[in-house]
Image: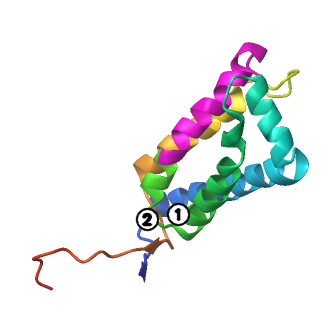
Amino acid sequence: MELSKASSVQDYGATLLRLSLGIMYLAHAHLKIFTFTLAGTADFFAKVGFPSWMAYPLPFAEIGAGILLIAGVQTRWVALALVPVLLGATYPHWPNGWVFTATGGGWEYPVFLMLASLVQALLGDGAYALRLRFARVGYAH
């Protein structure tokens, strides 16, 4: 593992986005586990047509993704992996309108997070990210 170094303002921007998304995913998992509870989240999932069992692994996937994003490990892949989750989060809120403060929550928040995750995937790790180095077979050092 090695720690990347910053080389531009864009690297710092990517880092700020990566840290913000990581913290947000941790907070979102916390909300599902401690505010709504896993059983309550499962009930909501069933109510909107998703399999209720998905409510149990999803917050832990968000925790893992949040930690990986904050650390800067495989940032592009982690951010891309969250896009389908956010697409799913958009689905039940779509009929409620744009503003998330609408009754039942609107769709702008999950769509914004989905787009921010796509931007993160395009930008990459940014500064101060842990990068895993994989040995290449047949590659001389």
Q: Amino acid at mark 1?
A: Tyr
Q: Residue at x 43, y 76 (%)?
A: 5
Q: Residue at x 78, y 24 (%)?
A: 47
As for residue 84 lying within the magenta part, the answer is: yes
Q: Quadrant of residue 63?
A: bottom right
Query: Magenta residues?
Result: 81-99
As for residue 27 lying within the magenta part, the answer is: no
Alpha carbons under labels 2 and 1: distance apart: 7 Å
| Residue 118 horizontal/vertical position (percent) | 49, 41
Instruction: Judge whether 16 appears above or below 41 on screen.
Output: below
| Frontmost residue, 116 versus 65 | 65
| Residue 22 horizontal/vertical position (percent) | 64, 58
Which residue is tagged 1? 12
Marks 2 and 1: CB-CB under 8 Å? yes
Q: Is residue 112 left or right of residue 35?
A: left
| Residue 86 horizontal/vertical position (percent) | 61, 36
Q: Residues within 10 Å of mark 2 (few under 14, many from 20)?
A: few
Q: Quadrant of residue 52?
A: top right
Q: Is residue 72 left or right of residue 66?
A: left
Q: Does the rendering let one see residue 31?
A: yes
Q: Residues within 10 Å of mark 1 (few under 14, many from 20)?
A: some
Q: Which type of secondary structure does the marked residue at label 1 adopt?
A: helix
Tell me, for residue 8, which label it has, or none.
2
Q: Residue at x 48, y 61 (%)?
A: 9
Instruction: Judge whether 80 appears above or below 34 on screen.
Output: above
Q: Amino acid at mark 2?
A: Ser
Q: Is residue 120 left or right of residue 60?
A: left
Instruction: Judge whether 46 appears above or below 117 on screen.
Output: above
Q: Residue furthest bottom?
A: 141
- Magenta span: predominant SS is helix
Q: Does the rendering let one see residue 20?
A: no
